[in-house]
Image (cartoon, rainbow, N blue to C red):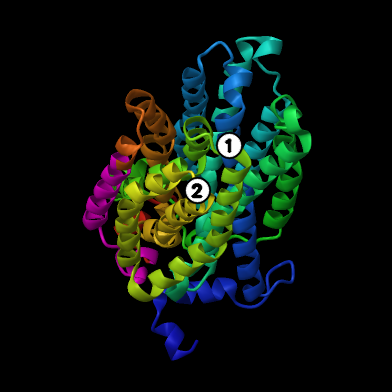
């Protein structure tokens, strides 16, 4: 062992785990690439499924599954089922967080991908209200819950598998790669809806919308193949070798790190709530309130999502240079600043200005989304990281992402104006900035990967 290795106990065990060649012949560098690619692709597939539902909820689900409601009530009901998926995500985070911290990241990620994929495929097979009556919306809610549980367990594992294989000095960049699943999933889902809407015409509302849901089976097969080729993360492997795996990680992280979980929840408000207004509610608002062309709005979303393929890892990289909190705080401030101009640009109805508004909104989101994975994951030690990071991340969806389209639709129905929605975005930003200031700073890596109580090693099984 060299003096450099001996001087860094937090990485010495990791070198032993990753040194040489893995069982399938891949070098450590090859495994790192596989881990990042498999995490990114798998997350893209899961979020394709999730975003696809949101697009359908805005465009076709009110008429298909809630036809007896008025137009505005049907939109609210459709977005209500959309929210159910967010309510289920913390359940997935707790269940899969337990197994991810007990059994490993890799095997848990295979299960989450399968669960979400099956639910999405079955939504594409679901008869509508005209065919089976009340059973249609009930079945839709059940499948949305299953989909939400799968997505709830996905984020923590995909981020950790990539981050724990990567360089400590580049964790902002490495952990941001799975977040590319968001713009990729948005591109795929929006692109598929646009393609089917154009090719099926009037048939899109009856059968064309089903094709993107059914096509998810192919994407899940690709994702499973890639994840089966990845080895377990070296940090978790080291944890098992040192017999420091926690018996009840979910309970322990709730008991010992409530402040970390709470600040993670609220720090995401300015990223989560506005994002689902920018990519989901905007479709209902643009077509219903402003009478904009559906195809034009989908085109604008595609362009903004494509920019995210560059901006998300770029801002993750910047967080390695200027600091996670600084970069995230800039994104929070930018989101608040764009809240009123965003709707002002949309309300002009001019195609170029609408596109500018959509791009600005998602760029502000990416300023937070790039550094967010590392910011959250570094708040927890290795043995509690899947459970703690996953719970905080997904609970934010319950109070921010899921209700956002519902709140915006209710504000619009009550006031007839977007002003209240802009103030809602500003309020989320204020709460996020406060939470960012209160978020505990992570301990040094050696303390978190060593046998400290923070890492949960005081309650490990032997």
Percent from the top left, x then y, of residue 236?
Answer: 51, 60
- 294 in relation to 440, above or below: above
Q: Which mark is residue 350?
A: 2
How many numbered marks are there? 2
Residue 418 relative to residue 190: left or right = left
What separation in Å lies between label 2 and label 1 (alpha carbons)? Answer: 22 Å
Q: Which residues are magenta?
A: 423-449
Residue 157 relative to residue 299: left or right = left
Give the residue drawn at x 52%, y 13%: 69
Taking the magenta stretch, the answer to whether it contains residue 436 is yes
- 412 in relation to 135, above or below: below
Does residue 23 appear anywhere in the picture?
yes
Give the residue drawn at x 50%, y 48%: 350
In the picture of the structure, the residue carrying the numbered disc 1 is 55
Most prominent secondary structure in the magenta stretch? Answer: helix
Percent from the top left, x then y, of residue 372?
Answer: 41, 58
Q: Which mark is residue 427?
A: none
Give the residue drawn at x 35%, y 53%: 338
Question: For numbered disc 1, what is the local secondary structure?
Answer: helix
């Amino acid at each position: 062992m060299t003096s450099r290795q001996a001087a860094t106990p937090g990485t010495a065990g990791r070198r032993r785990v990753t040194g040489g060649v893995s069982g399938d012949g891949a070098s450590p560098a090859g495994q790192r690439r596989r881990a990042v690619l498999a995490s990114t692709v798998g997350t893209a597939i899961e979020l394709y499924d999730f975003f696809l539902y949101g697009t359908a909820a805005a465009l076709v689900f009110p008429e298909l599954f809630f036809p007896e409601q008025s137009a505005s009530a049907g939109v609210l009901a459709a977005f209500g089922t959309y929210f159910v998926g967010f309510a289920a995500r913390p359940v997935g985070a707790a269940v899969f967080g337990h197994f991810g911290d007990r059994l490993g990241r890799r095997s848990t990620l295979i299960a989450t991908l399968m669960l979400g994929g099956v639910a999405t495929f079955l939504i594409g097979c679901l008869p509508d209200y005209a065919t089976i009556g009340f059973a249609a919306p009930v079945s839709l809610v059940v499948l949305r819950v299953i989909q939400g549980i799968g997505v709830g367990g996905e984020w923590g594992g995909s981020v950790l598998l990539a981050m724990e294989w990567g360089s400590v000095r580049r964790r902002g960049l490495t952990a941001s790669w799975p977040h590319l699943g968001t713009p990729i999933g948005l591109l795929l889902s929006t692109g598929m809806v646009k393609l089917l809407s154009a090719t099926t015409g009037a048939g899109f509302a009856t059968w064309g919308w089903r094709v993107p849901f059914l096509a998810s089976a192919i994407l899940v097969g690709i994702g499973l193949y890639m994840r089966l080729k990845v080895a377990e993360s070296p940090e978790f492997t080291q944890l098992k070798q040192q017999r420091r795996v926690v018996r009840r990680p979910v309970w322990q992280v709730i008991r010992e790190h409530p402040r970390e979980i709470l600040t993670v929840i609220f720090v995401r408000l300015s990223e989560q709530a506005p994002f689902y207004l920018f990519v989901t509610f905007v479709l209902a608002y643009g077509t219903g309130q402003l009478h904009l062309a559906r195809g034009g709005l989908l085109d604008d979303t595609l362009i903004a999502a494509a920019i995210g393929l560059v901006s998300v890892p770029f801002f993750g990289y910047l967080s390695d240079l200027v600091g996670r909190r600084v970069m995230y705080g800039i994104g929070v401030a930018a989101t608040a600043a764009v809240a009123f101009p965003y709707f002002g640009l949309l309300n002009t109805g001019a195609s170029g200005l609408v596109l500018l508004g959509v791009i600005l909104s998602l760029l502000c989101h990416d300023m937070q989304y790039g550094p967010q994975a590392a910011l959250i994951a570094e708040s927890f030690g290795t043995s509690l990281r899947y459970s703690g990071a996953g719970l905080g991340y997904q609970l934010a969806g319950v109070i921010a992402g899921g209700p956002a389209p519902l709140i915006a639709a209710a504000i619009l129905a009550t006031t007839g104006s977007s002003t209240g929605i802009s103030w809602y975005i500003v309020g989320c930003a204020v709460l996020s900035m406060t939470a960012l200031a209160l978020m505990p700073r992570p301990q040094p890596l050696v303390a978190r990967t060593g046998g400290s109580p923070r890492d949960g090693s005081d309650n490990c099984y032997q």
